[in-house]
Image: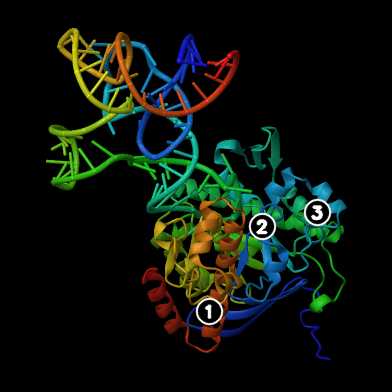
Amino acid sequence: MESRTQTTGQALGWEVSARDGEARAGLLRTRRGAIETPVFMPVGTLGSVKGVRFEELEAADTDARIILGNTYHLWLRPGPEVIRACGGLHRFVGWGRALLTDSGGFQVFSLSDLRRISEEGVEFRSHLDGRLCFLSPEVSLEVQAALGADIVMAFDECPPGEVGHAEARASMELTARWARRSRRRFDELQAGGADAGRTDEDTEGLSGGQSLFGIVQGAAHLDLRRESLARTVEVGFDGYAIGGLSVGEEKAVMYAVVEEVAPLMPAERPRYLMGVGTPEDLVECVGRGVDMFDCVLPTRNGRNGQAFTSRGRLNIKNARWAADPRPLDEACPCAVCRRHSRAYLRHLFMAGEMLAPVLISHHNLASFLDTMRRVRQAIRSGEFTRFRREFLEGINSGVE
RNA sequence: GCAGGGGUGGUCGAGUGGUUAAUGGCACCGGGCUGUAAACCCGGCGGGUUCACACCCUACGUAGGUUCGAAUCCUACCCCCUGCA
């Protein structure tokens, strides 16, 4: 038996197996399984990757190794007590693989009309029933302990993408202070056994506890980004995320920030770009040094009738597909593309059949995850540059 | 046959003398969606010319009529629904 004593005691294992330029291929070891990176993580905000069954997420054509849940949403409903009583989020939803929970920081942005920020935390007017709720770094980490995800996120403030320097600085500094508080409360909760998802000691050579990621903010201002990174690293986390992108800024700005920040992030820790992105964003940002991604696009756009294909986006509602016997993407090996035609999917969508969004979501997810498999392969074989060029050419060639 | 009610743009349905090419809904056509307040949101939707402003044509069962002006009023006819025979 090979000894893994050198990683025992840590909650998360991480090793890079290949590099190609800034792109890295690696293995992220969590208490609920190993995850090859770069990885795309499907979003399951409310405890469900919308429209996709867990069996399908596990199936070979998709094979998601880790999915997200959301602290704010699960906190409001069904509530952390319910989920703790059911043995944590894994057992509650019936998913045995890895989970990552976002802290609710994104809702500070997306629900900006319903909240007020103070040093202490964020007062939300619940979007469900209007009642006043208070989320802070401490509360967020307490809820995340009750959910018991394998990776949890520090509670941050996510400002709009185009905020000016002064506002971005104030926000970034608040996030930095919240990072310390998140770290402190996290450690207390772990020491106190509050983690509902704890696994046996030595699982995978890991401690069995949760791991915690810090989040870099600073909007489009590179000096603030660098400072935010330094202050986050100073606190010390198991992994580091870039937050506050794809929130209204120009795409070039996003790429510029990632290009500046990712290579400066600790090389011995996984790098997670939050909320990104399109297939081309994934490839571009892997090329800038990112290891982990999540995004609602495959499921949301799938539900709304848009398929991501190797030749770009295909809107299944378009009349031009009405009698098209071809699959969504002739190059896609997913279960949906192997079985169903564009004509059938369009018919289902136009008829309002719930199977249509289900099938397109499945295809999109399978497509995103397949892209990441090919990205990893390209990095390992030292052909990432060529892969990137050919992939982008394909995406831009247009669906016929 | 008699008595009521009704025939409006792809469809259902408002409008009952003048901003009416005609409110809405649906259908249809197109666009958007990036740590999910999203199975959602936005736009178009009689025809023609125009990049556009704009202009022309055709339209409220059919045919006449009244009026400066009619989907709206009058007459005849056709058709549909309900009740009674």
Q: Is label 2 on the same chain as label 3?
A: yes
Q: Nearer the viewer, residue A371 or A144?
A: A371
Q: Please report the residue visible at 83 percent of the width from the left and 47 percent of the height from the top.
A: A81
Q: How is the image coloured?
A: rainbow
The image shows residue A85 at horizontal and vertical percentages of 87, 51
Which residue lies under the disc numbered 1? Answer: A375
Q: Amino acid at mark 3?
A: Ala
Q: Point out the tag, 2 or 1, that comes first from the N-terminus.
A: 2
Q: Amino acid at mark 2?
A: Gly
Where does the N terminus of chain A fall, quadrant-wise?
Answer: bottom right
Residue A278 in view (yes/no): no
Label annotation for residue A44: 2
Tell which subunit mark 2 falls on: A
Q: Point out the tag, 1 or 3, that comes first from the N-terminus.
A: 3
Disc 2 to disc 3, how far (Cα)? 17 Å
Tell which subunit mark 1 falls on: A
The image shows residue A94 at horizontal and vertical percentages of 79, 62
> Mark 1 and mark 2 in contact (Cβ < 8 Å)?
no
Residue closest to the far bottom: A1
Up-down relation of residue A298 to residue A351 (above or below): below
Q: Where, by quadrant of the figure, is residue A252 drawn?
A: bottom left
Q: Secondary structure at mark 3?
A: helix
Tell which subunit mark 3 falls on: A
Residue A352 relative to residue A1: left or right: left
Up-down relation of residue B58 to residue A343 (above or below): above
Which residue lies under the disc numbered 3? Answer: A146
Up-down relation of residue A155 to residue A119 (above or below): below
Q: Nearer the viewer, residue A187 or A58?
A: A58
Q: Point out the tag, 2 or 3, that comes first from the N-terminus.
A: 2
Q: Please report the residue visible at 49 percent of the width from the left and 65 percent of the height from the top.
A: A342
Disc 1 to disc 3, how far (Cα)? 35 Å
